[in-house]
Amino acid sequence: MIELENVSKTYGGHAALSNVSLKVERGDMAFITGPSGAGKTTLFKLLYLAEKPDEGTITIAGCNAADLKSSSIPLVRRNIGVVFQDFKLLNNKTVYDNIALTLRIRGFMEREIKERVHSVLKMVNLRHKVDNYPLTLSGGEQQRITIARSIVGEPTVMLADEPTGNLDEENEKEIMRIFKQINTKGTTILIATHNRALYKNTARKVFFLEGGILKGEEE
Amino acid sequence: MIELENVSKTYGGHAALSNVSLKVERGDMAFITGPSGAGKTTLFKLLYLAEKPDEGTITIAGCNAADLKSSSIPLVRRNIGVVFQDFKLLNNKTVYDNIALTLRIRGFMEREIKERVHSVLKMVNLRHKVDNYPLTLSGGEQQRITIARSIVGEPTVMLADEPTGNLDEENEKEIMRIFKQINTKGTTILIATHNRALYKNTARKVFFLEGGILKGEEE
Amino acid sequence: MFSLRLALQSVIKEKWMSLLSMLSIGVMLFILVSVAVIVYNVEKLTARLPERLTVMVILKDGVTSEENKAVLAAIKAEPTVKVVTFVSKEKALDELRRSLKKDDFILKGFADNPLFDSFDVKIKSEGVRVDDVKRLIQKIKSMKAVDDVEYGEALMDSVYALKSGLRALGLSIGIVFVCSVTFICYTTVKILFYRHKEEIEVYKLLGATRWFVRAPFFIEGSIIGILGGVMGSGMLMGFYYYFLRKLVADIPMFTFMSIPVQFMYLLPAVGMLLGLGGSVLALGRLKY
Amino acid sequence: MFSLRLALQSVIKEKWMSLLSMLSIGVMLFILVSVAVIVYNVEKLTARLPERLTVMVILKDGVTSEENKAVLAAIKAEPTVKVVTFVSKEKALDELRRSLKKDDFILKGFADNPLFDSFDVKIKSEGVRVDDVKRLIQKIKSMKAVDDVEYGEALMDSVYALKSGLRALGLSIGIVFVCSVTFICYTTVKILFYRHKEEIEVYKLLGATRWFVRAPFFIEGSIIGILGGVMGSGMLMGFYYYFLRKLVADIPMFTFMSIPVQFMYLLPAVGMLLGLGGSVLALGRLKY
Ligand SMILES: Nc1ncnc2c1ncn2[C@@H]1O[C@H](COP(=O)(O)OP(=O)(O)OP(=O)(O)O)[C@@H](O)[C@H]1O
Ligand SMILES: Nc1ncnc2c1ncn2[C@@H]1O[C@H](COP(=O)(O)OP(=O)(O)OP(=O)(O)O)[C@@H](O)[C@H]1O
Ligand SMILES: [Mg+2]
Ligand SMILES: [Mg+2]
């Protein structure tokens, strides 16, 4: 599902990633970890096609990133759900409109949008907040909305960069529970974090990155 | 140094802070903690005068926030150093210029600026990065630059909102070490965090906030 | 459509800015068209100038009818000449009398006809340049039987100078104004773009196509351009009805002024194009 | 100064945008001044119109010298009249002869003087309105010994209509252009503001005064306004030297046209004010 082969990325002479190869199978839930500046966010930018690698090949959601015309980037992104530490919700839109946006962009009919939005809100347990504005919600709630937004389009892959970086332990647990649930339904998930607590007790694949170099992996 | 009396703040009907009273003495290092949405960031906004409280009085760095003309807000802010989770460094300026900005705003002479910038860079152990641009530094290094920027103006109070939220454990420890060092030199410090590790092993004052209500404090 | 709705919402939300940019565009287009109208009218007025110009060839007193015929033939042979008519001094007197109307008593006292025999030479309407006319006149003047040649030299020269000056002026004003209008659309759309920067970031992450992101801005720029053009047309009509018509009524000299109606329909179209152009520039390549 | 340096850096960095906005401002100020010049010239031209207007009072044939004197006295008594001169028909013929110059042979044939006795009435130069003149003429016309009164009624009316029309047009164009120029400065500075939004956020956190944050933008807006004004002045000078002077040389009718030099100095100042105004609007209240 996600495969990197000898990928390198340099920013103005400074190597953010050097010769990284890794593979995440369909249906897996994997973690990338490493100290700050290790290159986790850079790796994610390559994966959701916001940047191009200097070298190496990237395969995600069945597409080879190198062969991609820039006009088909949006179409690939529709198969990738993204979640960030800082939520990136639109504060002038209600929760409903924030989630519906994913589907409106794809040209869905209002009726189907309504159905789908309500079903994902149920999944993250926030059906009662459908008409709230993001800023009236707690950080944990906002992150759950972000997750709802990213799964409403039924992506095959989910990328989460420090999804619990802004959250306390309780919310952290709740978010991880939701991720596991989504993963059980068949979505491949890759989570970047420097928080050991997130992957400590799971028997999942963990990649260790440091200074742009893949130092090891662990099942 | 910092004193809140019965402070309330409401955002569109939703109370972010209700009737909060707390006091941090000169030279103290205190923590505010609580789950996400507790109102920590809101409290900080009130303290660095970005928002006005709906009710109650706030005293910081010897000024009563209520009596303040808006034109003297900048002058009070020069006595307050702020540090955020997302650094807020200017990426198109070198480390030197980022730190010097604090002093340029105050109209210092270039010679004194140079002296002071080098002395704070020494304090955070980043003298060799003086000509780097922020993006070429790791997150921990960037946060140390932010701290350097906030102390170069010799503030009497420092406010840090989740200063280690983006950082791994190693960097976290390093940042806390620097805070303690600054505190030893006499600067009052208030740190907001939901990371227990930050205050667990210190015999400092900790305020517990939840849903905008002060639930308790601990020495 | 979703894009159209977004664009309309944005125009309405930022109504002051939109209105001001429309107004600016409108007034610039109006001035642009005014200059075009002036150029157009001067062109129209002067296009047939050589044709209108009648060159009067005054013959010497006591010219024989043979000499007369020779001059006539020579003039007729010129390629620039359309018609040559002989005007005897009796006919000239008749005409003068008719043009004086009731004041013709002035002429009553004359014992003798004080006028001369002459030729009225009419110049061809097409393909004749001012220089050709001058050359012709020089030639006629040099004929032996000819006393003098009268024609509106000063007038013709100055009208042609005015014409070329106006053309240059019109062209430079045109270029500058097209740039300015595009620039105003550019800045307006750019500001809207910055206001929605966060939103656009999110759109891109969620897989919006480039077209989906840009369409509202293009539509918006076009709307502003069109409405600016409509305002310009409105001003033009206002100017026409409240100013020019009055002026023409008062000073018949300006009767020739006319505003081609096509401009009214053209302005919104031009506005739209420039608005669209400005939006395209404002959004640039739009990285993913 | 730090602010000035920042402003200059920004103008240079965004040179295309700055240049385009200067150009737009320049051309708008140029048009504005052109309109002002036209209005000014027409005002100047018509200010002394009643004074220049000579009313010719034609007396009936065979009027006695007593009646003559009575009319003279009556006209002289009018408050709007400056001078009245009696022109006998002999004098009139002399004048006609002189004005015909070498063509005066036309008059030779006359046995009798065909002209009339008349009064030349000159109107006062100050405080006389067109209506007053009309009333005066009506009054003179009704006198028994007076045959007819001749004066440039049509001309005067149309010039006055033109004048008031031009004034209204000039005023409305003036208002719209002032808005537009301010708006262009507004949008330009606003875009610069958005480009530096992050920076401004940081400045505020570090305790920069409002003045410190805004000064570079104010300076920038002013620079753009000033340079726009300079461009406008340049265009005005170019227009004057390459177009108007030629025009005047060719068509002496336009000799009256003059461009007050003060405009050249005024434009940059006006540009600066509008630029500053635009910047102030663009930055708004600037919350802390
Ligand atoms: N736009 C950029 N320009 C220059 N250098 C960059 C840029 N983005 C990232 N870098 C550099 O690339 C390296 C990797 O950065 P990245 O953000 O991927 O780290 P990370 O693992 O996400 O760290 P963190 O845990 O702090 O989020 C860093 O050294 C950083 O300085
Ligand atoms: N601009 C705003 N408009 C409306 N509500 C707001 C705004 N800012 C904050 N809030 C609300 O105020 C409450 C407190 O928010 P605040 O950001 O202070 O929490 P916090 O303790 O900093 O949480 P976190 O740990 O997630 O940073 C939240 O419920 C939030 O919804
Ligand atoms: Mg990162
Ligand atoms: Mg917070």
Image: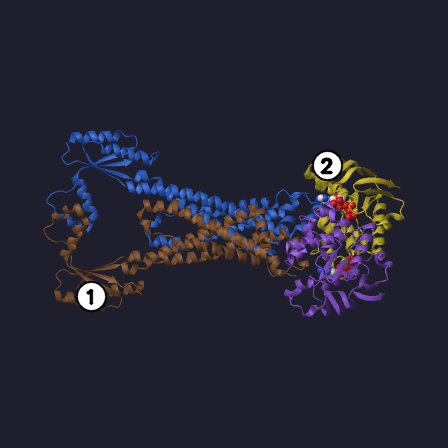
Chain colours: A purple, B yellow, C brown, D blue
Q: Residue at x 60, y 49 (%)?
A: D190
Q: Please, what secondary structure does the residue beneath circle 1 have?
A: loop
Disc 1 CB within 8 Å of nearest ligand 1 atom: no
- Residue A78 visible in the snapshot: yes
Quadrant (top left, top right, bottom left, bottom right) of the C terminus of chain B: top right
* Left or right of D79 in this view: D86: left
Residue B99 or residue C181, whichever sits in front? C181
x, y (%) of residue A129?
73, 47
Residue D249 horizontal/vertical position (percent): 34, 54
CA gap, disc 2 and disc 1:
103 Å
Q: Which residue is mark 2?
A: B54
Horizontal arrangement in the rendering, residue C246 relative to residue C117 (left or right): right
Residue in front for this viewpoint, D160 or A66: A66
- Observer-nearest residue: D36 or D162? D162
Q: Measured from the top left, where is residue C136 in percent x and y?
A: 26, 65
Q: Are marks 2 and 1 on the same chain?
A: no
User: Mark 1 belongs to which subunit?
Assistant: C
- Do tag 2 and tag 1 residues touch (Cβ < 8 Å)? no
Specify few, some or many for label 2: CA neighbours under 10 Å numbering under 14, 14-19, or 20 or more: few
Foreground residue among A23 and A19: A23
Kind of residue at badge 1 = Met
Mark 2 belongs to which subunit? B
Crowding at label 1, few (<14), some or many (≥20) Cα neighbours within 10 Å? Answer: some
Q: Quadrant of the N terminus of chain B?
A: top right
Q: Give residue C143's mark.
A: 1
The amino acid type of the residue labelled 2 equals Asp
Quarter, ligand 2: top right
Q: Position of residue C22 (x, y in %)?
A: 51, 49
Query: Picture quarter containing residue C102?
Result: top left
Q: Quadrant of residue C215?
A: bottom right
The circle drawn on residue B99 is none
